[in-house]
Image (cartoon, coloured by chain):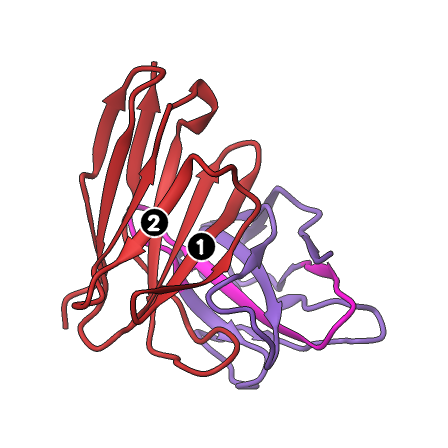
Amino acid sequence: KAGVTQTPRYLIKTRGQQVTLSCSPISGHRSVSWYQQTPGQGLQFLFEYFSETQRNKGNFPGRFSGRQFSNSRSEMNVSTLELGDSALYLCASSLRQAKGTGELFFGEGSRLTVL
Amino acid sequence: AQRVTQPEKLLSVFKGAPVELKCNYSYSGSPELFWYVQYSRQRLQLLLRHISRESIKGFTADLNKGETSFHLKKPFAQEEDSAMYYCALTNAGGTSYGKLTFGQGTILTVHP
């Protein structure tokens, strides 16, 4: 069974630009979560999608957005990039449909550098 | 608010020695606790969760609600245990939906 796939793996942008990151979950997983990982703040929850609906959202500004498609693939977008957005963005998928959080299966991440 | 604290950023032990990675949490509701691990050049993966009450790769962790702790223990460390370990918390049975609150992580190094 293929794992969670994230693209691109690395990218460099300049301040003010926008970026879109993609995540393909494990087949059969309908829940997709996104996390930001930085040396200073560690792993922080961005949002979670299930059946194309955002069910939960972390404390990030509106510049961070996401969506999920009918095939469970998900994208996240960051607009008007700031230097502080430089981070590893991790996607995780889960089988669990009901309340709570099941085991999360993480991708390798997309490393974003903002210059 | 929920918070997870891993007081040790770095932990070094020798092979065969016992190891304990500390995790304390702050949460007003009913918590579900996890340990995730990231080995070198691998992705973050679940090691164990408190509701399973399993021993995985010789590691165990007991949820102590009185002390709000979920320490990870192994009686005899192996070199292959060297990795970054994260303690994580979520709301058991609530509307957490994919949200885990992670500690800052502990880098465990097991020397030969």
Query: Circle 1 is placed at which residue position?
Result: A47
Q: Is B103 left, or right, of B112 in this rendering?
A: right
CA gap, disc 2 and disc 1: 8 Å
Q: Nearer the viewer, residue B103 or B13?
A: B103
Chain B rendered in what hue? purple
Q: Which residue lies at the image location 59% right of the left edge and 79% below the top edge?
A: B50
Say which residue label 2 marks: A66
In the picture, which quadrant includes the C terminus of chain A? top left
Task: Give the chain of mark 2.
Answer: A
* Colour in which chain A is drawn: red
Residue A85 higher or lower than A7, as above or below: above
Q: Is there any visible trace of residue B33 in the rendered image?
A: yes
Residue B44 included in the magenta stretch of the image: yes
Chain ID at mark 1? A
* Residue B31 is inside the magenta segment: yes
Residues B88 and A25: in front is A25
- Residue shown at 57%/32% (left/top)? A40
Mark 2 near mark 1, Cβ–Cβ under 8 Å?
yes
Question: Callout 1, which amino acid?
Answer: Phe
Please name the residue shown 22% across and 66% down the image. A72
Q: Judging from the image, what secondary structure is the residue with disc 1 in?
A: strand
Task: Judge the density around disc 2: few (<14), some (14-19), many (≥20) Cα neighbours within 10 Å.
Answer: many
Magenta residues, as a range?
Answer: B22-45
> Between residues A16 and A36, which one lies in front from this camera angle?
A16
**Which numbered marker is on residue B13?**
none
